[in-house]
Image (spheres, rainbow, N blue to C red):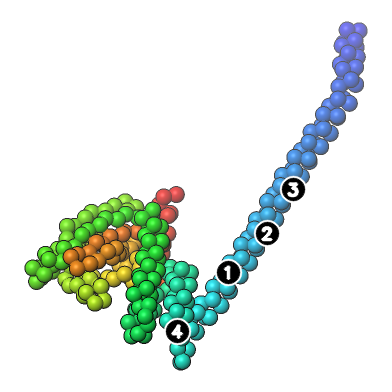
Amino acid sequence: MVDEKKEKDFWDKVDIVLRPINGLLTALAVALLGYYTSSILRQSEVRETNQRVYTELMSSREQAESGLRKDMFLSIMQIFLRPEGAGVESKMLNLEMLAYNFSESLNLKPLFSHMERQINTAGVSEKKDYKERLNQVAKEVTNRQMVLLEQVGRKFSRTIDFEKLRSSPGGLELEPEKLVLNNIEREFMLSVNGYDPEQRELTMELGVRTPRESSNVQRRTFTVGFYDFPMIDNTRLSGDQRVAVVLNQINEGGADITIVYFPGSYASLKEKVSYDEVVENLRILGQTR
């Protein structure tokens, strides 16, 4: 009995010694947990606040930019729509501003063609200079768009010999090409049916075959000139993709063209994605997850 009492006294003493320490450790653990939890909450609040402020700033910036572009667009268009008209220099300057700011969302070919007619009939002494200036603007717009489309798509080039075209009444067929974009292979077939030297335009037929979908060929006949920009003037393909033909150079002997195959998301803002394409994109996205 004495030994049991001694042993009990020993553990009682240990309990007396450790009890404050256990309490201290428990209090410290609770304090650390509270600090850690409050720190996480503060970081989350700061992150949410920063995201909200950033979103509001970006939204305000986009609204301001949209308002500025709208006012700019209306102001420029009034120059072309005035009943009394405006001088060649004024119209040329406004066309340049439109082209450099709205070429990805507007089909500016009618204005380019209108400006060319104005230059030809105005009788201005600087006719040659204005035409070179007009063509330079068109080339710069095309080059800007092509730089972007080439980064996200595929392309190939062909040279057209007008001597061979004249000796081919049924049209001059160019060498076909196969390109793959986003795991979709397509074969592109081009033929040149005519050439208008005054308008500097080619009449072409484009054929597109997608082996995995069908052996049928999707065909389209169109004209292409310096004022046809790839983001605007293109052919819609399945899978929300596009193909465009770009005229690079043209002279009495022949022409150089480039065919660019790119995702539909990089087409003009006026191009609306069909309901079927939206459903198909959602289905593919769900399969990849």
Question: Can residue 265 be seen here?
Answer: yes
Give percent across and percent down for residue 113: 34, 78
Tag 1: residue type?
Glu
Q: Would you place residue 96 above or below residue 255 in this image?
A: below
Q: Residue furthest front?
A: 125
**Judging from the image, what secondary structure is the residue with disc 4 in?**
loop
Q: Left or right: 135 with respect to 211?
A: right
**Judging from the image, what secondary structure is the residue with disc 2 in?**
helix
Q: Which residue is mark 1?
A: 65
Q: Residue furthest bottom?
A: 83
Q: Residues within 10 Å of mark 3 (few under 14, many from 20)?
A: few
Is the residue under label 4 in contact with that under label 2 (CB below 8 Å)?
no
Is the residue under label 3 in contact with that under label 1 (CB below 8 Å)?
no
Question: Which of the two discs, 1 and 3, labels the residue nearer the N terminus?
Answer: 3
The N terminus - image quarter: top right
Mark-to-mark CA distance, 2 and 4: 47 Å
Of circles 3 and 2, which is in front? 2
The label shown at residue 53 is 2
Tag 4: residue type?
Gly
Question: Which of the two discs, 2 and 1, labels the residue nearer the N terminus?
Answer: 2
The label shown at residue 42 is 3
Q: Would you place residue 210 above or below residue 81 in this image?
A: above
Q: Which of the pair 268/136 is nearer the observer?
A: 136
Mark-to-mark CA distance, 4 and 3: 63 Å
The label shown at residue 87 is 4
Q: Would you place residue 123 above or below residue 234 in this image?
A: below
Total number of numbered labels?
Answer: 4
